[in-house]
């Protein structure tokens, strides 16, 4: 019975993932700084990746948590995070119109989120931003912002709002999420270099890796 319920919730996630894709297309059309050739329109990301991520994410969290407040909160974070992942993957942009409200939502949801509080969420925002700030500064000075960007810093703050942070070893969720994202990014980068799908001159978007790291920590919190 639980497997059937998880499958039904997964279908909801797939449908919502598709709607997130429609939101991405809407946001894509409203960005004035984007050149016309960058407005790629509908692609495999909206048609397959986002519905697939929504389906898998919703299924996994339902299978782990069952019905409850935590499931609803984590499902919302899945939708927010996959939007950030997809848009950064496609356009190398992380939008303030997504990250800033997500931070506010994270602090508000911390009132009812398991293992979270407004203090932990705000502390996570501070740690997430400060931990990634040096990378953005170096990139801005030496890479003209082509590598690690300010949007990645704001994504770190969103991750902090979602996972929270405390001074106890068992509550360093924001740091664990950033470390997990860095490790995932390192493994993927090495694989791409070995298979010659990436050269040392190429730059990868960091956002998708940070999103995946956040997803891993949310799952095991």
Image (cartoon, rainbow, N blue to C red):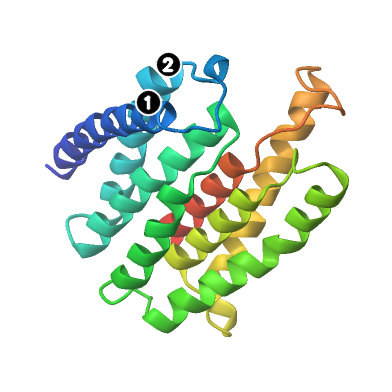
Residue 47, image x, y percentages:
36, 18
The one of 193 and 155 positioned closer to us in this rendering: 155
Residue visible at 21% across and 54% down? Answer: 66
Check the image and report above or below for 130 versus 180.
below
The answer to whether residue 145 is left or right of residue 121 is: right
The answer to whether residue 149 is left or right of residue 62 is: right
Element at label 2: loop
Check the image and report above or below for 194 versus 56.
above
Residue visible at 31% across and 33% down? Answer: 17
The answer to whether residue 14 is left or right of residue 25 is: left
Q: What is the crowding at mark 1: few (fewer than 14 residues within 10 Å), some, or many (at least 20)? A: some
The one of 180 and 118 positioned closer to us in this rendering: 118
The quadrant of the rendering that contains the C terminus is bottom left
For the residues labelled 1 and 2, the Cα–Cα distance comes to 6 Å
Check the image and report above or below for 195 versus 141.
above
Q: Which residue is mark 1?
A: 25
Residue 71, image x, y percentages:
25, 56
Residue 190, image x, y percentages:
79, 33
- Please tell me which of labels 1 and 2 falls first in the chain: 1
Q: Residue furthest front?
A: 32
Residue visible at 57% across and 22% down? Answer: 35
Q: Quadrant of residue 82?
A: top left
The answer to whether residue 206 is left or right of residue 162 is: right
Residue visible at 36% across and 41% down? Answer: 57
Residue 15: mark in rendering: none
Q: Residue furthest left?
A: 1
Q: Which residue is mark 2?
A: 41
Element at label 1: helix
Q: What is the crowding at mark 2: few (fewer than 14 residues within 10 Å), some, or many (at least 20)? A: few
Q: Are marks 1 and 2 in contact (CB under 8 Å)?
A: yes
The one of 108 and 137 positioned closer to us in this rendering: 137
């Amino acid at each position: 019975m639980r497997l059937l319920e998880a499958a039904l919730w997964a279908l909801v996630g797939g449908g919502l993932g598709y709607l997130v894709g429609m939101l991405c297309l809407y946001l894509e059309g409203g960005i004035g700084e984007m050149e016309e050739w960058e407005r790629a329109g509908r692609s495999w990301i909206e048609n397959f990746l986002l519905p697939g991520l929504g389906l898998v994410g919703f299924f996994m969290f339902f299978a782990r948590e069952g019905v409850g407040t935590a499931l609803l909160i984590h499902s919302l974070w899945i939708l927010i995070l996959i939007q950030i992942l997809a848009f950064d993957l496609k356009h190398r942009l992380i939008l303030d119109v997504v990250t800033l409200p997500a931070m506010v939502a994270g602090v508000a949801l911390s009132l009812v989120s398991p293992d979270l509080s407004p203090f932990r969420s705000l502390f996570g925002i501070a740690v997430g931003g400060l931990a990634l700030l040096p990378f953005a500064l170096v990139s801005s000075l030496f890479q003209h912002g082509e590598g690690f960007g300010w949007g990645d810093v704001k994504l770190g703050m969103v991750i902090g709002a979602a996972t929270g942070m405390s001074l106890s070893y068992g509550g360093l969720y924001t740091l664990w999420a950033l470390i997990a994202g860095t490790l995932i990014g390192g493994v993927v980068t090495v694989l791409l270099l070995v298979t010659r799908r990436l050269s040392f001159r190429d730059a990868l978007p960091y956002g998708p890796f940070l999103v995946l790291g956040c997803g891993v920590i949310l799952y095991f919190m």
